Amino acid sequence: MNTTSLDLAGRRALVTGASRGLGRHIAILLAQHGARVALHCRAVEHPARLIADHLPGKGHAVVTADLADLDQAAALPGRAAAALGGLDILVNNAGIYERMPAAGEDLVRWRDLWERTIAVNLTAPALISAAAVPLLAERQGYIVNVSSRGAFRGEPEAPAYGASKSGLNALGQSMAVALARRGIKVITVAPAWVETDMTRDYLASPEGDQIRAQFPGGQVVDPDDLAWTVLLAVSGRADALTGAVIDLNSASYLR
Ligand SMILES: NC(=O)c1ccc[n+]([C@@H]2O[C@H](COP(=O)([O-])OP(=O)(O)OC[C@H]3O[C@@H](n4cnc5c(N)ncnc54)[C@H](OP(=O)(O)O)[C@@H]3O)[C@@H](O)[C@H]2O)c1
């Protein structure tokens, strides 16, 4: 056994939301360690295709699905497995953050944002996971869910987001128990602020200093820290992580 490196040679991974942000970092790192990766994006293939074309190794794929459409979500693992010739690793990373009207104001918009956020951030990963289970290689299968610090700290301006991520934590823990006998591991990672398209405007605004002040070290989370944690989780070197919800928040919130 190679004791010095994390080796995913021969493993096939679907990473949702891999066209940019954290999903892009995760997809690149998994490919750098030998995995063949299906990069998922919503509708416009070009950015994900550009990333796929520059990944090391061969046989990577791009798959589109709007996760607000739950039929498209459920079909995604089958399409990724068809493109890769099987599936060993699922990373449920795609997600949206939408500020909502204050409770009691504009109930129509509040409900619309609630339903859309729960669909994309919780129902879609649940369906994708359920659809992936029969495909995931027995004893080698991994599901990693990308949650958020907001599941614990609260999201007063985006309660649907906080609720969706709390639900994702509970989903991952339940599935870890349910799938343990089949050898499928389920791990959840819960980052705090990372600079991506989702957060760039907030971090660049006057609010940015208040956000950075939440971090004792003065800096938000490095996207590579998240990607390396996902890599370790699916590497076969730390399978006792199954069922865990791993904080990646640079001591900005202790629970
Ligand atoms: N950034 C942070 O500070 C932070 C903190 C905690 C947790 N997270 C979580 O980390 C994950 C990744 O966040 P990020 O910051 O990398 O976000 P991002 O830069 O905004 O990227 C979002 C990704 O999700 C995809 N996506 C969004 N809506 C979709 C839909 N309806 N159907 C299919 N795909 C969709 C996007 O695809 P397209 O490019 O095709 O639109 C994109 O690839 C999310 O689950 C987020 O909640 C992020």
Image (tube, grey):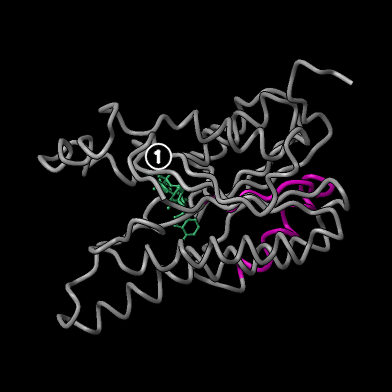
Crowd tier of the residue under label 1, counting other residues whose Cα lies within 10 Å: few below 14, some 14–19, many 20 or above: many
In the displayed structure, does residue 91 sit left or right of residue 164? right
Q: Assign the N terminus to one quadrant of the image.
A: top right
- Residue 78 belongs to magenta span: yes
Q: Start and end of the magenta stretch?
A: 72-93
Q: Residue furthest top?
A: 4
* Observer-nearest of 65 and 245: 245
Q: Residue at x 79, y 54 (%)?
A: 184
Quadrant of the rendered image containing residue 48: top right
The residue at the point 77 percent across, 41 percent down is 12
Q: Position of residue 111 (x, y in %)?
A: 31, 80
Q: Position of residue 234 (x, y in %)?
A: 71, 39
| 112 in relation to 9, above or below | below
Q: Position of residue 117 (x, y in %)?
A: 40, 68
The amino acid beneath tag 1 is Asn
160 is higher (above) or lower (below) than 239:
below
In the rendered view, would you say 24 is above or below 140?
above
In the displayed structure, does residue 82 sit left or right of residue 76? right
> At x 86% / y 60%, what residue is drawn?
181
- Assign a secondary structure to mark 1: loop
Extreme-front residue of the structure: 255
Residue 89, position as x, y percentages in the image: 73, 46
Residue bearing the label numbered 1: 249
Left or right of residue 129: residue 85 = right
For the residue pair 75 and 174, the one nearer the viewer reads as 174
